[in-house]
Image (cartoon, rainbow, N blue to C red):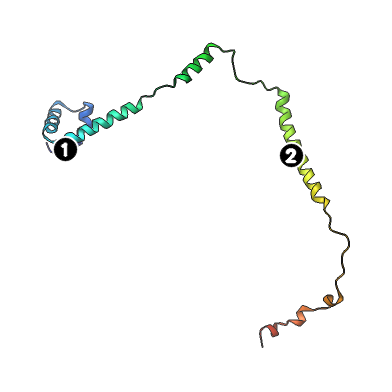
């Protein structure tokens, strides 16, 4: 048996799914070939680590806490919220939002610019910018 065929059959060999004649050939090859034996041992070690990682150990405090709650059903941490409170809380939130918007608008309207508008000087009113800066002057023609 060559190394390539042996390495191909290592999974089936470790799971015990090979026919007897193929199983004997793989065993003999593993006894004589150190490279394939090392690969097989590495595969077994990897499988062992994976199997150990699958085991889950429960938290003892969690188990104790759950068992205590099962044995004593009267003790609960749930608060009773009255229907009046369930309706009143959203109504208070909406009312406070409306009041804050109203106050913001009122504070924004407090500032008014002065009603006295200063007149423009006559010199500035008579300036005709279009006539002073003609397109021909700007294009240097």
Residue 47, percent across and down?
A: 28, 30
Task: Judge from the rendering whether residue 20 lies leftward or rightward of residue 133; answer left or right.
Answer: left
Q: Position of residue 20 (x, y in %)?
A: 14, 26
Residue 125 position by quadrant: bottom right
Q: Nearer the viewer, residue 15 or 112?
A: 112
Secondary structure found at label 2: helix
Disc ID at residue 97: 2
- Asked which secondary structure carries label 1, the reply is helix
Residue at (77, 46) in percent of width and height:
104
| Classed neighbour count for the residue bearing mark 1: other residues with Cα under 10 Å, few (<14), some (14–19), many (≥20) | few
The image position of residue 37, as x and y in percent, is: 17, 34
Which comes before the other along the chain, label 2 or label 1?
1
In which quadrant will I find the C terminus?
bottom right
C-alpha separation, residue under disc 2 versus residue under disc 1: 76 Å
Q: Residue tagged by mark 1?
A: 35
Q: Residues within 10 Å of mark 2 (few under 14, many from 20)?
A: few
The quadrant in which residue 118 appears is bottom right
């Amino acid at each position: 048996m060559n190394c390539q065929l042996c390495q191909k059959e290592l999974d089936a060999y470790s799971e015990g799914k090979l026919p007897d004649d193929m199983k004997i050939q793989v065993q003999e090859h593993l006894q004589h070939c150190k490279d394939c034996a090392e690969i097989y041992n590495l595969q077994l070690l990897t499988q062992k680590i994976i199997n150990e990682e699958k085991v889950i150990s429960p938290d003892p405090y969690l188990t104790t806490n759950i068992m205590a709650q099962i044995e004593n059903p009267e003790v609960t941490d749930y608060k009773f919220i009255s229907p009046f409170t369930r309706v009143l809380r959203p109504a208070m939130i909406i009312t406070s939002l409306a009041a804050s918007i109203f106050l913001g608008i009122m504070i924004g309207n407090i500032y008014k610019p002065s009603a006295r508008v200063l007149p423009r000087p006559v010199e500035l009113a008579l300036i005709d910018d279009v006539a002073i800066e003609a397109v021909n002057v700007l294009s240097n023609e």
